Amino acid sequence: DGGITQSPKYLFRKEGQNVTLSCEQNLNHDAMYWYRQDPGQGLRLIYYSQIVNDFQKGDIAEGYSVSREKKESFPLTVTSAQKNPTAFYLCASSVDSDNSPLHFGNGTRLTVT
Amino acid sequence: AQSVTQLDSQVPVFEEAPVELRCNYSSSVSVYLFWYVQYPNQGLQLLLKYLSGSTLVKGINGFEAEFNKSQTSFHLRKPSVHISDTAEYFCAVSGVTSYDKVIFGPGTSLSVIP
C-alpha cells in the first residue's frame, strides 16, 4: 500500500543537539510538507516543497531546516536554534501544490530535555 | 489571508446521538474547504472536501458538511455517532491558487460517551 512513513515514532534528545526526522512517501506525490502540532493550536506549517531540489519556508521555519534531494524523501532537521522543539511533527504530501488533499504520516513525537 | 475558527474545543456526545462540529472561516477570495480527522497518536486523514459545485458534501464514515458562503461556515455533521468516532477533528481552508497554503483550525475534540 502506498503511504507516508515517518520515523522514528518517538524521539528524545538533549537540549543543544540537532536532530533529523525522517519522512518517506511512495505515493509519487510532487509536494511535501512539514507541520508542527501543539495542543490547542492546530497545525502550523514549517516548510514545504513543491518539487525536487526546491523548498520554501512556512509560517514557523526559524530553527528548522529541510532538504529535498529525492522526490520520495523530505527530512526535517530541528536545530539547537529552535527555542521550543518539543512537539508532535507531521509530514504530509499531496499530488501537486494546487491544494490537493493532504496525505499525512503518523507523526514523530519529539521530546527535548 | 485566510483564517479558521472552530468555536468548540471539546464536544461530548452520547453514542447514537447526532453531532455538529462548527467551523467558520474568513477569506476575501474563493476558498477550498476540508475536514480532517485525527485519531490518538496518528496523523490526519481526510474526511471530506469542498472544491466547487454542490454545497452539501458527503464524506467517509457517514459524515457530511455544508458550505454556506453567506455565513462563511462549513459545519460538519453526523446523524448518529459511534464510539469509534472519538477523535480530534480539524477544519481547514485554502485559497484556490497554487500559492495559497492550507490553514488549519485549532481542532475540536469529539468524545462519544457510551
Image (cartoon, rainbow, N blue to C red):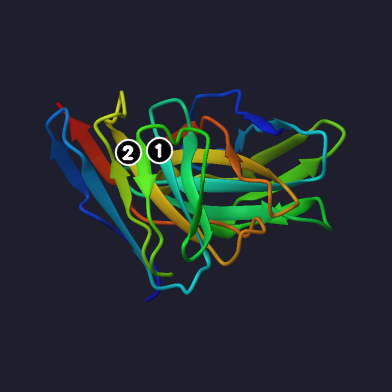
| Residue B41 visible in the snapshot | no
Category of crowding for the residue at label 2, using alpha-carbon neighbours closer than 10 angstroms: few (below 14), some (14–19), many (at least 20): many
Q: Which comes before the other along the chain, label 1 or label 2?
A: 1
On the image, the x and y values in percent for residue A55 come to 50, 53
Q: Label 2 lies in what chain? A: A
Residue for badge 1: A36
Identity of the residue drawn at 33% across and 53% down: A106
Q: Does the residue at mark 1 contact the one at mark 2 (Cβ under 8 Å)?
A: yes
Whether residue B89 is situated above or below residue A93 in the rendered picture? above
**Is label 1 in a helix, a strand or a loop?**
strand
At 56% from the left edge and 53% from the top edge, which residue is drawn? B47
Residue B76 percent coordinates (x, y): 64, 41
With respect to residue B32, does A85 lie above or below?
above
- For the point 70% across and 30% down, which residue is it? B24
Q: Which residue is more in the foreground, B30 or B60?
A: B30
Above or below for A4 versus B22: below
Q: Which amino acid does label 2 sit on?
A: Phe
Disc sitting over residue A88 in the figure: 2
Which of these two is toward me, B14 or A9? Answer: A9
| Residue A48 % position (x, y) | 50, 50
Secondary structure found at label 2: strand
Q: Position of residue A102 (x, y in %)?
A: 53, 56
- The quadrant holding residue A27 is bottom left
Q: The C terminus of chain B is located in which quarter?
A: top left
Q: Taking B15 as reference, is A19 left or right?
A: left
